Image (tube, rainbow, N blue to C red):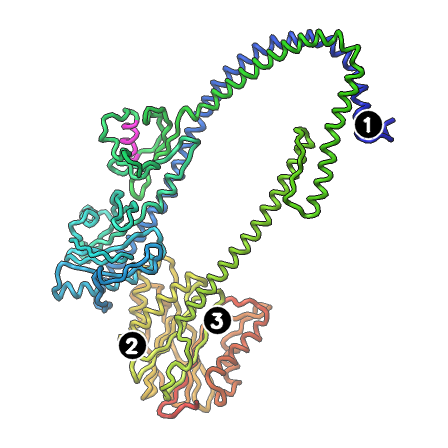
Amino acid sequence: MFKGLNIKNKILVIVLLVSVVAQIAVATIASVSLVSLKNYSINAGAKLGNTASVQSENAFKEDAEDYLLKLTKEKASKTDSLLAKFSSDVSSISRGIEDIYKNKSNFIGKDLPLPEMTKPGDINDVYSASSKIFSNGFSNSVNLERKLLSNAEYIVKPVYINNYGIDSIYIGTKTGICYIYSVYNDKIRFVPSERKWYIDAKKAVENKIDSPVWQSTYKDIATGNLCITCSKAFTDSSGNTIGVVGSDMFIETIKEEITSTKVGDTGYAFVVDNDGKIIMHPNYDESGFEKEPLKNNNISEGFAGLLNDMKSGNTGIKTVDIENKSCFAAYTKMPTTSWSICIVSNADEIVAPAANIKDQIENTTNTMVDYMDSVLQATIIICISLFIVFFVLSILLALKLSKTITNPILKLSKGAAIIGKGNLSYKLDVDSKDEIGQLANQFNNMTSDLKKYTNQIKKTTAEKERMKSELSIAKTIQLSMLPCIFPPFPQRSDFDIYATMNPAKSVGGDFYDFFLIDDDHIAVVIADVSGKGVAAALFMVIAKTLIKNQALNGYSPDKVFRLVNTQLCANNKAQMFVTAFLGILNLKTGEFIYSNAGHNKPLLYRSGDKFDWIETKPGFVLAGFKNLRYKLERIKMNPGNMLYLYTDGITEAQDEKGKLFTGKRLKGILNLTNVEELNIKEILGKVKDEVALFSKDTKQSDDMTMLLLKYFGSEKKDL
């Protein structure tokens, strides 16, 4: 019957048929039904409004209390984690300074400038900070202690660089010396032992308290920013205080985490210290803000009780009057500082939805009753006249309905075709509220999501390129710290040396070094730091610097390793370690003394012979355990001899089947190479090519580092 009709005509016919049949039945029962429905709606609406209002208000209160307390604990936990890290850094510095004082003979130190003699740094550039020092006297003992404290920079600087919230780090001693690491160069003078941060830290030691102490907020003189201070004493072997380490932290580092907290339109958070003083609040910097409300007798009893509970370190939730407004207040303690955080929300705002629900139900009920009255009256009139004009009205209604349904479908079809061609900015203009309108909205949402996703892919790609560029710069900086100019000593004819390092990642943990201790002795170092990436690279810099510094002091390799191991163990929270080989060659006699800290055995080539492993007893790795001793060994090198050093990235290189390159293969390749006809750079290039040929397309899994030293003695090298 309807097969030959389009959608529009089908709808028209169906509506007309249904309307004619239904109108007669509807007209008969409409009046009676409307009267009954009106009376029922009035009673049901009133009952529903009262019940919903009471139950909703109770539910909103319970949910709000649970949510506020949970949110408060989460904020306290996050903030306390930041403060705990700051406290841990101060404790680490204190332990490091304590070790320096207990091992004075291991440190030389240097003269540091007065603050006003240094160049001011940029507060936004942590690398522009510098060490400075002043004291109340210049006796021999004070001057020696000043030099000793200059070694603090090796401990303080990494902490300062890796904590952008730190304003400055300082060390005060009982002898009146004050060491400062910061970007400022103000001419400041004070007696450290008279400052509160020093006095409180000293009292903590006297009271057998091992944790750092905290000072309340204050404004930094140089920047005007709010700061907090954390300090901890360091002691001698008898437990007597030698001095105190202190550090200032910009409160903005944690303030944003707290004061940005929003609960509804009126909610906010604030922090109270141990004395009940408000130290963080969204309105803290506003003129007239009451920072010590407990001293104000005009505050409400409930608010005073809340502050005293927070001051005592309690956890809970209360309904209190704050600024003449009833509020829900959830509070809890932050363990690191014993300060307390509180999140406040206006009670009226929390229960407002319940009142709105009741009003909406009442309004809806009244509207419905009025509507039913009007419909009832209209129905009586319409039922009399409708039968005469019904057919005409039914046709008009059917036409209108048909158009309303089909037009959105046509718009949807046209829009889908445009979007399908790639125009993601096109929006479907369908204003109907039915399923067709919902489908159009879904199309619009889909195109918006696709457009956002496309933009996000572009943004993500750009961010990856930026990170790749920064890692490339880091790799360049790392490689530049290793000797990279060859020949390094063109004026010397009694030896030649060459080295290479290829990191597995953008930055790596292997390193090599060589340097003249004096005119007759050259030191060679090769080492492998556990792990890869930035962390290994940073640990590499520290280990390389310590080894070179101790070797330049004239110590033998075994003593160098013993001192460096002690220094690396002092603050090795990351539990990293280093395998290393250090040797010193006497360029006059050819005597080569060396020590091995868990590293691969070097290969020695004797003129006219072959490469072979040198006899060495590997000691334990550096930074593994304190108080280790290392064995000093020696061999005789003759003119023409060569010493080949390497890391396990060479011998443990893998092919596509997972097989290792091995030390046996390395030795074989060196012995198959005509080393007498090649220079040392070409020899290392030959080894590198063989490793690459062995690995083929297998991804490099470890840093590869090699060093070759050739000894000529009184002979002249072939240039």
Distance from label 1 to label 2 (Cα)? 104 Å
Q: Which of the two marks, 3 or 2, is nearer to us in this view? A: 3
Give 135 or 668, whichever is nearer the viewer: 135
Q: Is the residue under label 3 in contact with that under label 1 (CB below 8 Å)? A: no
Residue with the mark numbered 2: 556
Whether residue 438 sits left or right of residue 537 in the image: it is right
Q: Nearer the viewer, mark 1 or mark 2?
A: 1
Question: Is residue 311 covered in magenta?
Answer: yes
Horizontal side of residue 608 vs 631, given as left or right: right
Give the position of the N terminus as an image quadrant.
top right
- Residue 593: image x %, image y %? 33, 80
Say what secondary structure mark 3 lies in: strand
**Residue under circle 1?**
9
Query: Tag 1: Cα neighbours inside 10 Å, few (<14), some, or many (≥20)?
Result: some
Q: Amino acid at mark 3?
A: Asn
Q: How far apart are the alpha carbons under marks 3 and 2?
A: 29 Å
Mark 1, secondary structure of its residue: helix
Q: In the displayed structure, would residue 101 be above or below residue 717?
A: above
Residue 240 visible in this rendered orientation of the protein: no
Q: Is residue 700 magenta?
A: no
Residue type indicated by callout 2: Ser
Percent position of residue 134, x then y: 18, 60
Q: Residue at x 33, y 25 (%)?
A: 320
Measuring from the top left, give residue 95's x and y in whole percent: 27, 56
Q: Circle 2 sits in a helix, a strand or a loop, which is it?
A: loop
User: Chief secondary structure of the magenta span?
Assistant: helix
Snapshot quadrant of residue 710: bottom left
**What amino acid is labelled 1 in the image?**
Asn
Give the extent of the magenta segment: 303-313
